[in-house]
């Protein structure tokens, strides 16, 4: 099955991935809960808190980590765990949002995001991708793929596809906090290698309307 013209990075989606969207849950690394909590507390107490409708990112050299030895070491251990699990020696960023409107990250064409959920707050989050296609009558129809993600889940998707995130049940303490790698996904060989490293893990919570 091929992706619709102009959708995402326009690579064919393998038969093992249902629907036209390159977006699925995958196996996740086992992370040290104490280290995860240190990072969660750092982000939740940070002045650079994400706005309601935007995601914010932190790297290891940002002051919230660089100036605090305990936080810096915790993030370094989580990074090594993700690198060991995936076999990819890539930088790991911390991404956080309260909720995010549908948007496209055009600057990441040819790349995919691999994310592990550290924190959600009281409720799980919905992460969804979508695109439009005309019907035979010429009217646009929306196709989407969504996943319910909870702490400990991992997922991968093409960020050049329109996507959004929101809590299942809004709450003042909500915040989606992720550890994220940006992985190469420019051609069929790289996508095949990515699927080999991160095989899809389907759950009963999965929903398609494609």
Image (cartoon, helix red, strand yellow):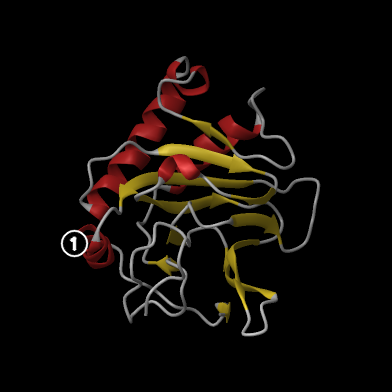
Looking at the image, residue 203 sits to the left or right of residue 125; the answer is left
- Residue 156 on image: x %, y %: 42, 59
The residue at the far front in this view is 137
| Quadrant in which residue 78 is drawn | top left
- Callout 1: few (<14), some (14-19), or many (20+) C-alpha neighbours within 10 Å? few
Q: How many marks?
A: 1
Considering the image in quadrants, where does the N terminus appear?
A: bottom left
| Quadrant in which residue 17 is drawn | bottom left
Residue at the spot x=23%, y=63% of the render? 188
Residue 5 versus residue 154: which sits nearer the camera? 5
The residue at the far top in this view is 67
Residue 53 versus residue 209: which sits nearer the camera? 209
| Quadrant in which residue 137 is drawn | bottom right
Residue 107 versus residue 129: which sits nearer the camera? 107
Residue 145 can be seen, yes or no:
yes
- Residue 148 on image: x %, y %: 60, 68
Residue 137 versus residue 165: which sits nearer the camera? 137
In the rendered image, the vertical position of residue 196 relative to residue 71, given as above or below: below
Asked which secondary structure carries label 1, the reply is helix
Looking at the image, residue 118 sits to the left or right of residue 176; the answer is left
Residue 35 can be seen, yes or no:
no
- Residue 26 on image: x %, y %: 39, 66
Q: Which residue is denoted by mark 1 in the rendering?
A: 189
Looking at the image, residue 173 sits to the left or right of residue 80; the answer is right
- Residue 52 on image: x %, y %: 74, 40
Residue at the spot x=51%, y=36% of the render? 39
Considering the image in quadrants, where does the C terminus appear?
A: bottom right
Residue at the spot x=33%, y=37% of the render? 77
Looking at the image, residue 48 sits to the left or right of residue 157; the answer is right
């Amino acid at each position: 099955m091929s992706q619709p013209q102009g959708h995402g990075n326009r690579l064919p989606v393998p038969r093992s991935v249902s629907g036209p969207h390159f977006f699925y849950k995958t196996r996740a690394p086992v992370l040290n809960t104490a280290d995860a909590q240190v990072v969660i507390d750092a982000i939740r107490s940070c002045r650079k808190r994400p706005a309601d409708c935007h995601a914010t990112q932190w790297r290891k050299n940002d002051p919230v980590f660089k100036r605090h030895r305990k936080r810096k070491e915790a993030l370094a251990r989580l990074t090594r765990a993700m690198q060991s699990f995936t076999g990819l020696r890539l930088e790991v960023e911390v991404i956080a949002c309260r909720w995010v409107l549908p948007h496209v990250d055009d600057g990441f064409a040819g790349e995919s995001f691999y994310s592990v959920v550290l924190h959600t707050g009281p409720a799980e989050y919905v992460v969804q991708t979508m695109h439009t296609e005309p019907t035979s009558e010429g009217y646009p129809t929306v196709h989407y793929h969504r996943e319910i993600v909870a702490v400990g889940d991992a997922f991968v998707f093409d960020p050049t596809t329109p996507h959004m995130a929101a809590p299942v049940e809004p709450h003042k303490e909500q915040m989606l906090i992720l550890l994220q790698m940006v992985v190469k996904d420019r051609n069929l060989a790289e996508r095949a290698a990515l699927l080999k490293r991160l095989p899809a893990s389907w759950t009963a919570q999965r929903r398609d309307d494609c």
